[in-house]
Image: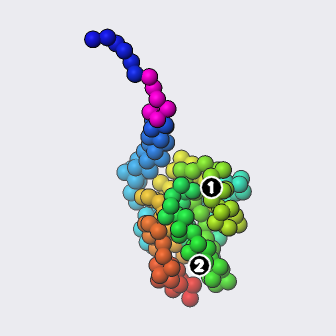
Amino acid sequence: MTGRRRPITRRAVLVAAAAGAGLAVTVPLAHGLRVAPGVPAASPGGLAAPLAGNGPDGTFFDLATLRGHIVVVTVWASWCEPCRREFPVLLAARSRWYPAGLRVVGLNTADRPESARRFLREAAAEALPVVSDPDGRQAVAWAVRGIPETVVVDRGGRLAARHQGEVTWAWLEASVGPLLG
């Protein structure tokens, strides 16, 4: 038997790169959930974990500045199709309930800044405060198990509700509406 090697194809390189990128996000998320299942934002009534950092456009945001407001934190990525579908619902809720004190904030995880900026531009959501989380560490602190995921923080900074998967208007009305009084 000869020691002939097969040439490495472009497809093999792309598959290996995609697998590496997936591990770069999955391992920190899985590790964080295994090591710290009781992180502050894990269950209703607990204090929301800190959320601060630069967005894809370089603007700094800190969730602590919104104390006294009801905050919907949406965890998303530009490559997530359900995230794309739910954004119009989140923006409609923001528009409807902004005068009553609702704020919507994005946690953009496992994404590239240029892709996130393009997503926000296409969604007409460039004014939305966003924290970039390329390595998933902030998502771990928020006990995120997948995207999209939505967390509602009450006026006192406590977790009021959480939803895994694409949000609906009905869920927002049931989870956010009563908090707004």
Give, as a three-letter code, the residue at label 2.
Ala
- Residue at x 44% of width, y 22% of height: 7
Instruction: State yes or no: residue 54 in magenta.
Output: no
Most foreground residue, 122 or 39: 122
Looking at numbered disc 1 in the image, what kind of residue is underneath it? Ala
- Circle 1 — which element? helix
* Rendered view: 101 above or below 143: below
- Which residues, given as a range, are shown in magenta? 7-13
Residue 73 position in % (x across, y down) = 55, 67
**Looking at the image, which is closer to me, 45 or 109?**
109
Disc ID at residue 116: 1
Q: Give the farthest residue toward the bottom.
A: 181
* In this view, 56 is above or below 1: below
Q: Is residue 52 shown left or right of residue 137?
A: right
Q: Quadrant of the C terminus?
A: bottom right
Q: Can you give x and y, in whole percent of width and height, for residue 53 in the image?
A: 64, 55
Residue placed at 46% from the left, 35% from the top?
11
Q: Which mark is residue 94?
A: none
x and y percentages locating residue 129 in the rendered image = 66, 64
- Using the rendered image of the protein, determine whether residue 28 is visible from the camera's viewpoint: no
Q: Name the residue located 48 percent from the left edge and 47 percent from the top edge.
A: 25
**Which residue is painted at 64% across and 66% down in the image?**
123
Looking at the image, residue 118 lies above or below residue 8: below
Q: Quadrant of residue 145?
A: bottom left
Spatial CA span between label 1 and label 2: 21 Å
The tag on residue 93 is 2
Quarter of the image for the N terminus: give it: top left
